[in-house]
Image (tube, coloured by chain):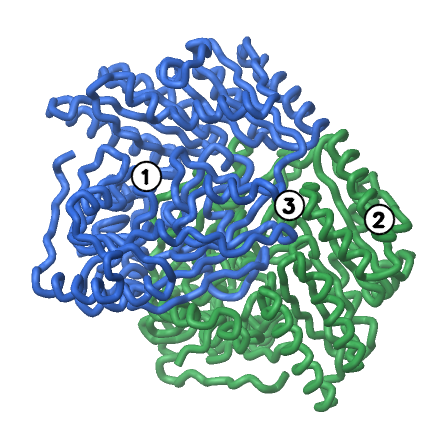
Chain colours: A blue, B green
Amino acid sequence: MGNVAIKKQETGPLEACIAELVTLLGDRLSRVAAVRSRHGRDESHHDGADPDAVAFAQTTEEVAAIMRICTRHRVPVIPFGTGTSLEGHIAALEGGISLDLSGMDRIVRVSPDDLDCTVEAGVTRMQLNEHLRDTGLFFPIDPGANASLGGMTATRASGTNAVRYGTMRENVLGLTVVTADGRVIRTGGRARKSSAGYDLTRLFVGSEGTLGIITEITLRLYGIPEAIRAGTTCFATIAGAVDTVIQTIQSGIPIARIELIDEASITAINRYSKMDLPVRPTLFLEFHGTEQGVAEQAEMFAAIGAGNGADVFTWASQAEDRNRLWAARHSAYYATMQLRPGAKGWPTDVCVPISRLADCIRETQADLAQSGIIAPIVGHVGDGNFHLIFLYDEADAAEVAKVVEMNGRLVARALAMGGTCTGEHGIGYGKLAFLEAEHGPATALMRDIKRTFDPLNILNPGKVLVMD
Amino acid sequence: MGNVAIKKQETGPLEACIAELVTLLGDRLSRVAAVRSRHGRDESHHDGADPDAVAFAQTTEEVAAIMRICTRHRVPVIPFGTGTSLEGHIAALEGGISLDLSGMDRIVRVSPDDLDCTVEAGVTRMQLNEHLRDTGLFFPIDPGANASLGGMTATRASGTNAVRYGTMRENVLGLTVVTADGRVIRTGGRARKSSAGYDLTRLFVGSEGTLGIITEITLRLYGIPEAIRAGTTCFATIAGAVDTVIQTIQSGIPIARIELIDEASITAINRYSKMDLPVRPTLFLEFHGTEQGVAEQAEMFAAIGAGNGADVFTWASQAEDRNRLWAARHSAYYATMQLRPGAKGWPTDVCVPISRLADCIRETQADLAQSGIIAPIVGHVGDGNFHLIFLYDEADAAEVAKVVEMNGRLVARALAMGGTCTGEHGIGYGKLAFLEAEHGPATALMRDIKRTFDPLNILNPGKVLVMD
């Protein structure tokens, strides 16, 4: 966006810090421009900012040593997983060290009997599920990207399964965290519930690397359901699709996935994933349970859909067909990017109470139409969460300004409806301006916590909160 | 227990504070001994400590005014709901003001379409469910007592339904909180998920009145299931019952309630609730779903039970029979108290990973037998959580010492198994000594948060954390 303020580190302390890091890490401390550049820019439209160096850590103890060095020299540290964040989370706005945790990719422990596991922060969601394959268990949280579980924890990620299985908030049982000054702490534990003390786990979940460096995560796992039925159904209108979602949730059907894809997104998906879905507002669905249970759920759902004008149901019972369907859904972002060649894509998300979802999408579509902005909509609508990808010409200042305003109106609309400025992408630096609008005086308490945990403001500075 | 240190407030600031509170509240500020005494002692065995006065607040603004006055005079404030806590939470260890929120009993809003509601802190769980009766919705969290929802939030309470519906941690969407210095903040919101900023909601849930005064709570609600089937089944051994629980959870049956009651507790319940359950280790069960769904769940469960020696299944299909069953379960604490007339009851709870539950209960029972201590066991075993009620003669110092040691071994055993020192009762002042054993260096971060939110240490001092 070209509007981010970059602050440079003073050379003296920075060089002294890097020299110590080289002593600690050897060639796992890189100053190569291409490496730095890859670590300063995420998958969003936001401007990147290169760190001064990249440290590749392999253990929690090493992370602690790095933090002690960086604290001593007051040099910023930005934790890095896979770089797939969407609000500029990893941009080194004040320079400093990108702390790459992708080498911490060990699966420490899986306990099928307890339906839990502990992984290092660099393990990706797909790596974990691949590892679990023979256990009959899976980890359900699935943001579009194959993100690291550390990054997913730090951004309180969710995905298509959240309507049934919750988000990272509900599925992280405990953490190992390195504090700004290099202490190693463990939060939470393996008990399913506890009333022992403050919930530090939930405080670090969603803190975007600004309160500590997450190095290990204990996660809930789930048994792979006996039966899975996936499918699609399309509607004459978006309203019909959204009303179907609302009534499904309200009726208590334990649907595992219910995703809305608008006509523009269907067009994009058809082209990108070589499918031939009808170009209509569509729901992608999945039911989990026993054979009898999914049949019953599907039947109840079909009755609700029929009442709202659903006219084509296509069921994918084979695992291979289901996988193709969900791969197509997960590629919606990349597919959309190709709808307007040469355009830049700006992904954003909001989340509202389910009763306001239809209003929010309708008003947003009217706003888009009036503004002449192209922005396909997809969404985890069972949670009231939906995404837009604005496609715009970044060389056209007037168009950029229009999108910026549209994004502001989208957030304002969600907040006015009792919603949030981001359901699952996080604040990064892209949504800094909206945090206070959403949380008002509570923002002051968040700042107090940040100052307490990171008095030197070296943990991913410039993200989540504007600090004075 | 007679071993709690009581600190008195200095008379000057205290009298000045109370004078201002009288001006604010009139006769809603009480110094009557009986009123103070009722507010300084909870339902546990822990010594009470009377506050110097009791303030009956009616609005959030009034709470804010009270906090501003008490901050100015540095006088402690202990929030009070129904006084049913179990670890000495409401004892005024340093004197000061008990802030009684029971008059804040308005149900602010119920949104059936969004399956949520907002209530004032003094609304009790039964009052809420009574209010919801005609909506087809219910709020599932059910600690034994008819506690206030503010108190349940503050102690991160759970109960028999947590295995399916989660605890207060999962069911609080947002809060109104008054800070120590009298600011009113709102945390969270009504969206089902959000990645916007630090999770202040979860930080206040379970903070036991030590970080702020919770005045309003936004809660998730659930549709009353189409079909409910409750029942009991008994086993030759505790091991058979516990193994049945473990296998049920591991197999993914979405059981709504699964409670273990040992033989001693069955004896107590039979006497107290005039029932004639076989005196054997027993599971109380409940399944929620569609007619077809609960039938299937019950069948799967019965097969697991049969493999572990379950020999009598009694189903309570009528609402009235079910209510009788759960009323009996909820009265287990009171029933147990009558097993040894004249004895004092010391309720405690721990929670372990489900794979260790059988070991933990077996070792605990052996320890009890060896120590000659009477302590019936009941538990929300689907979560790995179980309760003991030690029945002891408080005049017998040797017996008291034995129980103190036994309680310490119980906690140490749970922690060694990866569990927690309390699944749902909280720390209060009764478990202060165990918090650091459980959380180690993380306790320092909890202290940092306490100092930041309550720099004068006037919010329920002496609870959760030992502050120096």
Q: Is residue B3 above or below residue B369?
A: below
Q: Amino acid at mark 1?
A: Thr
The relative height of residue A268 versus residue B100 in the rendered view (above or below) is above
Quadrant of the drawing holding the N terminus of chain B: bottom right
Q: CA distance from mark 1 to mark 2?
A: 48 Å
Q: Residues within 10 Å of mark 3 (few under 14, many from 20)?
A: some
Tell me the element at label 1.
loop
Q: Nearer the viewer, mark 3 or mark 1?
A: 1
Residue B223 location, quadrant: top right
Q: Amino acid at mark 2?
A: Gly
- Which callout, 3 or 2, points at the residue further toward the start of the chain? 3
- The three-letter code of the residue at mark 3 reads Arg
User: What x and y, as percent, mark residue B13?
Assistant: 35, 80
Q: Position of residue B220 (x, y in %)?
A: 54, 42
Residue linked to disc 1: A84
Q: Which mark is residue B307?
A: 2
The chain that hosts pointer 3 is B
Q: Secondary structure at mark 2?
A: helix
Residue at left offset 51%, top offset 41%: A129
User: Residue furthest toward the bottom?
Assistant: B397
Residue B192 appears at what percent x and percent y? 46, 39
Q: Chain of mark 2?
A: B
